[in-house]
Image (cartoon, rainbow, N blue to C red):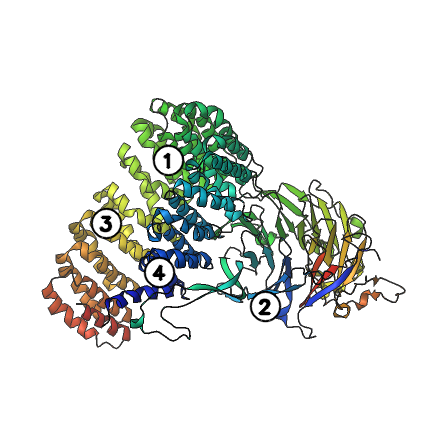
Amino acid sequence: MAGVGGGNDFQWCFSQVKGAIDEDVAEADIISTVEFNYSGELLATGDKGGRVVIFQREQESKNRPLSRGEYNVYSTFQSHEPEFDYLKSLEIEEKINKIRWLPQQNAAHFLLSTNDKTIKLWKISERDKRAEGYNLKDEDGRLRDPFRISTLRVPVLMPMDLMVEASPRRIFANAHTYHINSISVNSDHETYLSADDLRINLWHLEITDRSFNIVDIKPANMEELTEVITAAECHPHQCNVFVYSSSKGTIRLCDMRAAALCDRHSKFFEEPEDPSSRSFFSEIISSISDVKFSHSGRYMMTRDYLSVKVWDLNMENRPVETYQVHEYLRSKLCSLYENDCIFDKFECCWNGSDSAIMTGSYNNFFRMFDRNTRRDITLEASRENSKPRATLKPRKVCTGGKRKKDEISVDSLDFNKKILHTAWHPKENVIAVAATNNLYIFQDKMN
Amino acid sequence: MAGAEGEDSLYPIAVLIDELRNEDVQLRLNSIKKLSTIALALGVERTRTELLPFLTDTIYDEDEVLLALAEQLGNFTMLVGGPEYVHCLLPPLESLATVEETVVRDKAVESLRKISQEHSPVDLEVHFEPLVKRLASGDWFTSRTSACGLFSVCYPRVSSTVKAEIRQHFRTLCSDDTPMFAKVLELDYVKSDIIPLFTALASDEQDSVRLLAVEACVSIATLLPQEDLETLVMPTLRQAAEDKSWRVRYMVADKFSELQKAVGPEITKNDLVPAFQNLLKDCEAEVRAAAANKVKEFCENLPEDSRENIIMTHVLPCVKELVSDTNQHVKSALASVIMGLSTILGKDNTVEHLLPLFLAQLKDECPEVRLNIISNLDCVNEVIGIRQLSQSLLPAIVELAEDAKWRVRLAIIEYMPLLAGQLGVEFFDEKLNSLCMAWLVDHVYAIREAATCNLMKLVEKFGAEWAQNTIVPKVLGMANDPNYLHRMTTLFCINALSEACGQEITTKHMLPVVLKMSNDQVANVRFNVAKSLQKIGPVIDSNALQTEVKPVLEKLATDQDMDVKYFAQEAISGM
């Protein structure tokens, strides 16, 4: 069974699963975003209840050389609370839409987390010393007689058990009328952008009371609205370039050097539509749900409902690669429209070397494509395959006629088990897959 | 409080030390600000051996606290025992220099620079320079940026071997990937080694770096002799003024006056004038606005002999275009400085060329543009007298005073005292008085409040007699208004005007009205009466205070309404 993402003998195996086993899933526990930090040492997840959980990889120990570092809980905190917008009489959900890590700048770690309206900068730091010794209190905490104080005591720092603290350092609020769908940290390490349905703002990490609006696609007359922004990302190396995708399947690349307001794009990426496959649902399924630059900065990947496309930034008229994620759903679009699944927003990600890409599907399946060998594989995140270091068996969906033994038919797919959020370790073959309220971590098998 | 003297004096210090760890950040901040008191009580040795180690490791705190700490340590030399021991301050400052908050790092670097002066050359090499080396080779860019700020202070006083080491570190940092340190780098200098590095940074790929090079250009230009400017600095500057990235051009426009002073009159005439023209015509509105802001300063700093000529031939044509720019920020920026040109050009040129521009901007559709013209009338007054403008001025003022947006109305109210002063009391009475009264009954509270304050300033300008004749009657007339908010406005005006109007007017005219309102139907009015009486109490004569005011207050103290009772009692006890 040739694998994806590595050499021929490459195989994925189960490593860990986090989260409750109950069938009854509390809505608040549903994971809404997953992100590794720049070194891969930390893995953050956000959920619908507004909480952020950060896992840290164990250092590999000499005693167990065959077991790669496992991820254990490092810090948990409540990032956002539900709010109420009094002016519009609307509830603001606490669901974490995106988490993005900042590049490390000292011993502490920083991340940005956002819900629909407010972005927060969190500092996660370790404390392993505690000050001891008071002047006015003795060791038991009893107050000393002020008149008996004859010498001054300076506190002494004593070691203590490691404590990880998360504190909100900045709150960036009130800049978005519509729901924030993306945040992206710029390569200059000073600024970041946030995007909602109609506008993109540029922030400075140290300034919370102002942001610059750099894209505004709101029409003068809202009745003429036909297109919204679905995702945005900064280029990994060029601090003046960013892209944003739309609900019509187009991507615009903008250069912030050209003008202060980037309403005019520098590049416009769109694949001409295949007239033979046009249907009532064409526009809906062409809506791009995620856009990601490759680590090299040369390519970008977009995810629409049925496929993943890789674009060369130098070629605007069509993608260089197209991968079908679950083409068998094309004939089911009507029922998927009725149960709203057609509007699901799947994310996609690159591996560290840009040689492979991954995205999720239904029935807790997720797909990986090797760009060099053109091989693809479907794997499943399920409790049944959760024995430690158990190899994952490829899955197959049967599209018609005779169903083979291990295959599953399209009609048996569970559309409530969707994998929308996945993340790939920046350097190694370790992946994190969010299946509703569970987080699965898979690693490659050491040969 | 009995007790031996020694014990008494220790208690407050003991409290301060304990509060260094209090949960309340304000208490921690307070203790840190009094760190010198703690250090004095501990004595130099305990400060060195106990206090500083404690401070070095507690950098978990809020920025305000760390900032205060960084500042305190910069002044701690004597508290640790003098220059001989000043190097003990380095460990805590070193940790502060690696914190992620820029303000704290900058303060720590500032303190390090300060105490470096107290280090002997030997101590510099033994303690200070290794610190700089550690920061410069640190893992995180935060420590590397701090290192950049320290090279210049230790460089002059160390031996030549150490100097070479420092230059090497500096060069390494210049090729560092992290763009952020470039900001600090540019503001530091070591003369001859810098120019090639500066030129390289000015052509960096990332425009964030290039635009900071423009800032550095100014400092470098001031350091070099005139002959070197043309070869070493001007090529970079010319490149920057035509950079493809608007942010770099913006930076040039923003720093234009400093550049002008730095390069001197010859280069200004030959290079900067055409560059300035191009910036005024730039395709990006932000750049045009930045350049427009600098028009007055640029013109003022032109060499005297060619000033008028340059302005009339090169600058004025561009300025004329800007008056009808499509972008309101550009027009607004221009409006705030254009009037200043009149003093430079003199009466005739102002009347012929500038006056039409002022009048056009006074009619601009954007209220901010009009406001900016009005706020700068004093320059024109000196040269041609406001009368020329007053015909167009009045409609403009009236329109702004009645603008639908309350913030625009607020802004014009704020200029009213200034205008009144310049236009004179007759003009004011004739044309502007009714406006000021109308504002007192505006439906937005902020406007009514500002209008009250405005009246007070007018009285200060025009005097009590004027007040008595023109505005006091109208203000007092509002006391009979059916709307209680307007009746309250009368009271607020009286509060504001009583002092300026003086004892006689207040006692004879204002007091009776206030006292009458103590019978008002609305409780809000009544309790404001009590507050007013308390406020004007000091101004009216003491006889009236006893015979007229006190009885009324006592009556109000028995009012049905709780708030009326409260304020009446407050007023009584205040007397």
Mark 1 vs mark 2, CA separation in Å: 56 Å
Between marks 3 and 2 in the image, the one whose residue lies nearer the viewer: 2
Q: Secondary structure at mark 2?
A: loop
Q: Are marks 1 and 3 in contact (CB under 8 Å)?
A: no
- Residue B338's label in the rendered image is 1
Circle 3 is placed at which residue position?
Answer: B458
Residue farthest right in this picture: A402
Q: Quadrant of the C terminus of chain A?
A: bottom right
**Between marks 3 and 4 in the image, the one whose residue lies nearer the viewer:** 4
| Helix, strand or loop status at disc 4 | helix
**CB under 8 Å between discs 3 and 2:** no
Q: Quadrant of the N terminus of chain A?
A: bottom right
* Tag 1 and tag 2, C-beta contact below 8 Å: no
Q: Which numbered disc, 4 or 2, marks the residue closer to the eye?
A: 4
Residue for badge 4:
B30
* Marker disc for residue A49: 2
Protein chain holding label 3: B
Q: In the visual, does A424 lie left or right of B544?
A: right
For disc 2, the neighbor class at 10 Å (few under 14, some 14 to 19, many from 20) is many
Q: A330 and B38: which one is in front? A: B38
Could you give the CA–CA distance between mark 4 and mark 2, rounded to whole angstroms? 38 Å
Q: Residues within 10 Å of mark 1 (few under 14, many from 20)?
A: many
Instruction: Measure how far apart labels 3 and 4 are at the Cα level.
Output: 43 Å
Q: Position of residue B212 (x, y in %)?
A: 49, 38
Q: Chain of mark 2?
A: A
Q: Residue type at mark 3: give it.
A: Leu
